[in-house]
Image (cartoon, rainbow, N blue to C red):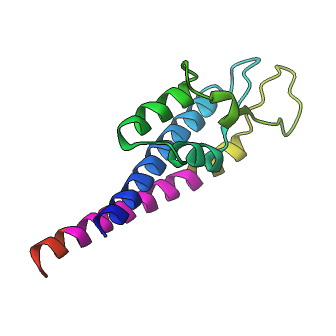
Amino acid sequence: MIQRLSETLNFQSEALMLRSERQRLIASNIANADTPGYVAREMDFASALRRATGPGTGAGVLHARVQGHLQGQPGGRAAADLRYAAPSQTNLDRNTVDMDRERASFVDNSLKYEATLRFINGSVKTMLDAIKGQ
């Protein structure tokens, strides 16, 4: 039972870290909305989570592997999960940031981040209650 709980918490903590990285990426897109030639980036969250929590990822290596993966460091696979956003309309300055899409993504990711955080907090509270014998 402890191993199952530990695996669940590890999965949720990696999801939380990836949500945080996705939020940073969206914020970067928003910050560069007026930068000529800036090409917006997106993260394939599902693929990144599968890679981060897939077979062969030990708890000690997992965080460093995901960080390297997202930052494009040696050993990471940033090209697989970070991609350029498809432009929704053509702009004279070749900027591909769609503020409506970015705002919606920001809110969606924020809600999912909060839900993941609440799940982790609930799991920890349940575990502490079980340890206390309540």
Relative to the observer, which residue lies in front, 80 or 38?
Answer: 80
Quadrant containing the N terminus is bottom left
Residue displayed at 62% across by 46% down: 45
Q: Is residue 131 above or below residue 10?
A: below
What is the x, y in percent for residue 48?
60, 43
Count the marks. 0
What is the x, y in percent for residue 84?
75, 31
Relative to the observer, which residue lies in front, 115 or 120?
Answer: 120
Q: Is residue 6 above or below residue 33?
A: below
What is the x, y in percent for residue 27?
55, 35
Q: Is residue 114 above or below residue 66?
A: below
Dividing the picture into quarters, in which one does residue 86 lie? top right
Residue displayed at 14% across by 71% down: 131
Q: What range is drawn magenta here? A: 107-127
Relative to the observer, which residue lies in front, 68 or 2?
Answer: 2
Is 118 a magenta residue?
yes
What is the x, y in percent for residue 24?
52, 35
Residue displayed at 39% across by 65% down: 119
Judge whether residue 28 can be spotted in this image.
yes
Relative to the observer, which residue lies in front, 131 or 125?
Answer: 131
Residue displayed at 69% across by 19% down: 35
Dividing the picture into quarters, in which one does residue 99 lie? top right
